[in-house]
Image (tube, rainbow, N blue to C red):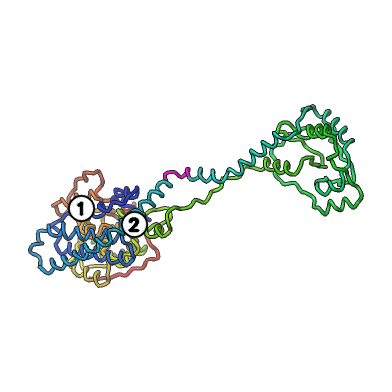
Amino acid sequence: MAARSSSSSSSSSSCQGTINISATTEKVLVDNRITLSYYYRIAHNILKKADIFREENNIIDLYVMLLRFSSLVTETIPCHRDYKTSPQGNKLSLKRKLITALTELEELKPAVQEKLQELHIKQTFQLNKQKNPRQNDSLDSSVAWPAIKQNFNDYSTNKRQQPVTSKLGYQGPKAVEENLRRISLSIPRPTEETLSKHSILGPNGLRGQWQPPSNYKVVQYPSSVDFTPLQIPRVSDTQQCIKDGTTERDDESRPEQERSNLESVVQPKNNNHLIQESDSLISFEDEESSLETNIIRQPSPPPVLADVQDLIPSDARTECGMEDASNDALVCYEDPLQLHLPTKLMDSFMKIAKPNTNKNLETCGVLAGSLKNRKYYITALIIPKQESTPDSCQTTNEEEIFEVQDKQCLFPLGWIHTHPTQSCFMSSIDVHTHYCYQIMLPESIAIVMAPRDNSRKHGIFRLTSGGMTVIRHCPKRGFHSHDPPSNGDPIYRHCTDVYMNSTLNFDVIDLR
């Protein structure tokens, strides 16, 4: 089960070609309603993600994290109204970390530029392949078919070059019978040398003379062509017939006129016509001609998919992150990272919230987890101390939550709460609460559990970029309405990059 937030759809253009690093490191505007210590924590989490990307040798994401940290320290935090009065030790600590980050950025810049170029080549190649799928098929067809087409052309050429031409044409059953009877009486017997070359002697072998078709044998046009290969007697059978003492003379001594008459009768002028032959079958054509006839009788083979050499080195494909998600998908560095949610987490939370739900009181919890291979995994459900009402829920000791997260090296990945008496949606209080989570981490999610909503029991939401702007400029508190974002987006949307993971385990940490 997956969904994609609006921020992903707006940045999908990153997959259309060159990665826009500046778009991933936009300046974070300061919001003085959020405490300065909260911005310090944002900077701390950015460096923690940078450490993970450094260990995974993911230099592009590492470069992006260091740029975000530098922008936050130099452009956002100094603009906070409480920055000038903040402790000097905090300022010096940030300054030292900033110098280290800037130094590493300069060292990484050449390697990042090289990786971006490789990724751009890969993206261009993949996009061209997706936009023109039929072009690859036509290319494969052009590679696979020439030999077969050449065989057909060769057959047509050979047929035109054959000296056998019909002068009699088709003269009806009686004329055919007359010609065949006259020719059959004068066919010379083949020699032993000829018998060693020819193996198609018919069911009568050498014990009888070839009989022409009777009067009732007429030209028939079958509804379907039989592609069953002819059963050719083995050489041993032919040799046995020779030992019996009945041999025929080579047809090479046959007069040229008689052979021409015979072939003109046996071979119809129209290739679409088929003469039904008698039980005894004798071929008067050489082996090469029979092979070509088999080619004509074979059905058209299906197109063969030719192997196309990938021009992108395999190491470049791995370093650019092409093979982690899927073979056909490309990593879009401007999109939110995937977030994996344990399948049983929501049911476990509802069991914990059941006492409050029975009293029509809301319950909230904090989602935390880890980062690995550009994917977030929710591995902890923290139940903080809280104050609840039928339509709101407020945590009372956030420092305790941060302490648990720091102690277990967890990232804040969102929150979950119940609507015991309402439907599944995000209220004005909910969007203001989630605004703080999404400033901390853009991939943060808000889960709403609505047990009394018959149409939807739960929803996984995230604010859009336009919604973040609206909430940042909204000074109101409590329940109130919001104007829609100027870009036409809603304030929040269902997520599409959240995946229900049945194999993911999680811990419940109840701080109440």
The reply to whether residue 286 is in sight is: yes
Residue at the far left in the pictured view: 85
* Residue at x 27% of width, y 71% of height: 408
Quadrant (top left, top right, bottom left, bottom right) of the C terminus:
bottom left
Is 439 left, or right, of 344 in this rendering? left
Residue tagged 2: 115
Q: In the image, residue 24 lies at what x, y percent?
A: 26, 54
Looking at the picture, tell me which residue is in the foreground, 234 or 478: 234
Determine if the magenta segment contains residue 131: yes
Vertical arrangement, residue 18 with respect to residue 398, above or below: above
As shown in the figure, which amino acid type bears the numbered disc 1? Ser
Measured as percent of width and height from the top left, residue 247 is found at 89, 46
Q: Is residue 189 left or right of residue 424?
A: right
Q: Which residues are magenta?
A: 130-135
**Residue 371 in magenta stretch:** no
- Measured as percent of width and height from the top left, residue 168 is found at 79, 27
Badge 2 marks a residue whose secondary structure is: helix
> Which marked residue is nearer to the observer: mark 1 or mark 2?
2
Viewer-proximal residue among 283 and 456 = 283
**Residue 428 has which mark?**
1
Q: Is residue 420 visible?
A: no
Residue at left offset 75%, top offset 31%: 165
Residue placed farthest to the right in the image? Answer: 245
Query: Is 357 on the left or on the right of 239, as rendered?
Result: left
Q: Position of residue 46 (x, y in %)?
A: 24, 63
Q: Choose top left, top right, bottom left or bottom right for residue 33.
A: bottom left
Q: Main secondary structure of the magenta part?
A: helix
Q: Which picture quadrant has residue 393?
A: bottom left
